[in-house]
Image (cartoon, rainbow, N blue to C red):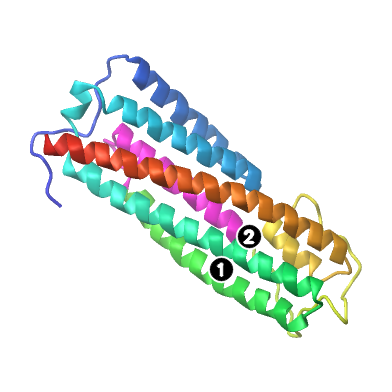
Amino acid sequence: MALHHGRSLSFPSSSHPALSHFDENISRLRSSEAACSSLSSISATINGLKNLYESIDDLLLLPHIQQIVSEECVDDYINLLDACSSVKDIISLSKQNLRELLSAIRRKDVRGINSYLASRRNSKKMIQKCLKKQRRSSASATSENASMLKDAESVAISLLGSLLSYTLGTKMQERKSSWSLVPKLMHSKKASDGENEFNKVESLLQVNQENELVNHIKEMDSSIQVVEEELESIFRQLIKTRVSLLNILNH
């Protein structure tokens, strides 16, 4: 891809309120990344990512920042938008699958329940492919002379990957026989409240905890709805930032 010759991707070191705001946002995101242990914490982190890119928009208003914008910066946003769009699609699919599962549980439809498990396995394959792609993107966004825009891209890719990893959950041992909520229930152990929310659905499907499962899916549906809204918000913000970069290059 073509670059504007003589332009560096590094920002000047002089202090500016917009620069301080950027530093605060990216530091907060880096420290919160390890805390992405639930859908609610992830949605809060995605909101923080939106704040980060809003601070970048403020930086792009500064003349000395505009001078160092290159076509590479714009191209990087294509990868970032693609990653965000893929995560949005996976989250929406997960919500749809959970709603179909809830309907199957209420109808005591074993076939519908097993259909959810099949869809879940397919979703995990999609997530794994998406994670591999994002790992490559994250690696390309990191270098010895990484700029702030590159740092922001790396953090964004990493956080989106954290959301995908959480949606993937840990690998659970599959049983040879079909899982069903009815008519045969497995053991009567109770799923741990502290486990991954997606894994907990699969755990509750193995035990006689129908009421708990229904309540859990309802709670997840609400949480996923918030995550969807936050993802849509950051997606719109990324488009806005990319338009700003294009305007700078064209003028």
Q: Earlier in the sequence, mark 1 or mark 2?
A: 1
Q: Residue furthest left?
A: 5
Using the image, determine if residue 180 lies above or below residue 72: below
Q: Is residue 233 magenta?
A: no
Q: Is residue 1 left or right of residue 52?
A: left
Q: Position of residue 81 (x, y in %)?
A: 36, 51
Q: Position of residue 86 (x, y in %)?
A: 44, 59
Main SS of the magenta part reads: helix
Q: Is residue 156 magenta?
A: yes
For badge 2, the amino acid type reads Gly
Q: Position of residue 200 (x, y in %)?
A: 74, 60
Nearest to the observer: residue 224 or residue 140: 224
Using the image, determine if residue 196 lies above or below residue 44: below
Residue 124 marker: 1
Packing grade of label 2 (10 A; few <14, some 14-19, many >=20) is some
Residue 196 visible somewhere in the drawing: no
| Magenta highlight range | 141-169
Residue at 24 percent across and 30 percent down: it is 10
Residue at 70 percent across and 76 percent down: it is 174
Q: Secondary structure at mark 2?
A: loop
Residue 11 visible somewhere in the drawing: yes
For badge 1, the amino acid type reads Lys
Residue at 64 percent across and 61 percent down: it is 170
Q: Which residue is mark 2?
A: 169
Check whether the beta carbons of the residues at disc 1 and disc 2 lie within 8 A of each other. yes
Which quarter shows the C terminus? top left
Q: Position of residue 38 (x, y in %)?
A: 66, 47
